[in-house]
Image (spheres, helix red, strand yellow):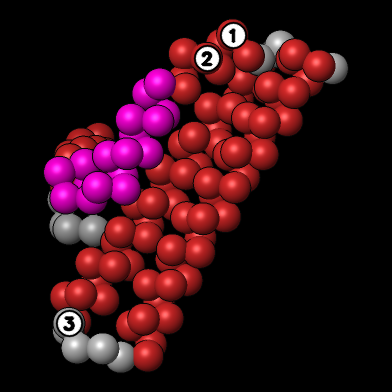
């Protein structure tokens, strides 16, 4: 933390950096844009599909979880690419592991929406 950046000033700077990161991800990461689009379409359906606040939170939370994991994966990929573009086994492994995390978050979101949808219509 920079000297003098405490309390509200720190919060303001942190918020600005976070928005800068979201804009950069949206501008430069196709997968993030696609997942934001899917989340924007699904979010209104969360109200309709959920029976209570917990199921709503699970639906919305699973969408945000995908976006969070995608942001972390993009950060890993950017750092690896910054270090160098030549092929290295550890660089490839880091990118593959990040991709696997995104895949698992998408599976979790799909299971959440599928199960709660099933309960809504057939339960």
The answer to whether mark 1 and mark 3 are in CB contact below 8 A is no
Q: Quadrant of the C terminus?
A: top right
Q: Quadrant of residue 108?
A: top right
Q: Label 1: few (<14), some or many (≥20) within 10 Å?
A: few
Q: Position of residue 85 (x, y in %)?
A: 17, 82
Residue 17 visible: no
Where is residue 86 shown, x and y percent of the image?
A: 19, 88
Report if residue 29 lies within the magenta region.
yes
Please name the residue that numbered disc 3 is placed on.
85
Q: Which residue is mark 1?
A: 48
Q: For this view, does 37 lie left or right of residue 123?
A: left
Q: Nearer the viewer, residue 99 or 73?
A: 99
Which secondary structure, mark 3? Answer: loop
Q: Give, as a single range, the part of the protein colored magenta.
A: 25-41
Answer whether residue 15 is magenta in the image.
Answer: no
Residue at position x 24%, y 58% from top? Answer: 1
Instruction: Give the secondary structure at mark 1.
Output: helix
- Horizontal side, residue 114 vs residue 63: left or right: right
What residue is shown with label 2?
A: 45
What is the spatial separation of the Cα atoms under label 1 and label 2, in whole angstroms? 5 Å
Q: Earlier in the sequence, mark 2 or mark 3?
A: 2
């Amino acid at each position: 933390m920079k000297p003098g950046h405490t309390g509200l000033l720190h919060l303001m700077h942190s918020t600005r950096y976070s928005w800068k990161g979201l804009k950069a991800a949206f501008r430069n990461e196709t997968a993030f844009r696609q997942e934001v689009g899917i989340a924007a379409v699904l979010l209104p359906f969360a109200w309709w599909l959920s029976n209570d606040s917990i199921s709503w939170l699970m639906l919305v939370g699973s969408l945000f979880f995908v976006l969070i994991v995608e942001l972390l994966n993009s950060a890993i990929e950017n750092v690896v690419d910054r270090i160098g573009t030549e092929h290295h086994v550890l660089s490839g492994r880091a990118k593959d592991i990040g991709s696997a995390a995104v895949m698992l978050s998408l599976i979790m979101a799909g299971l959440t929406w599928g199960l709660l949808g099933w309960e809504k219509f057939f339960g």
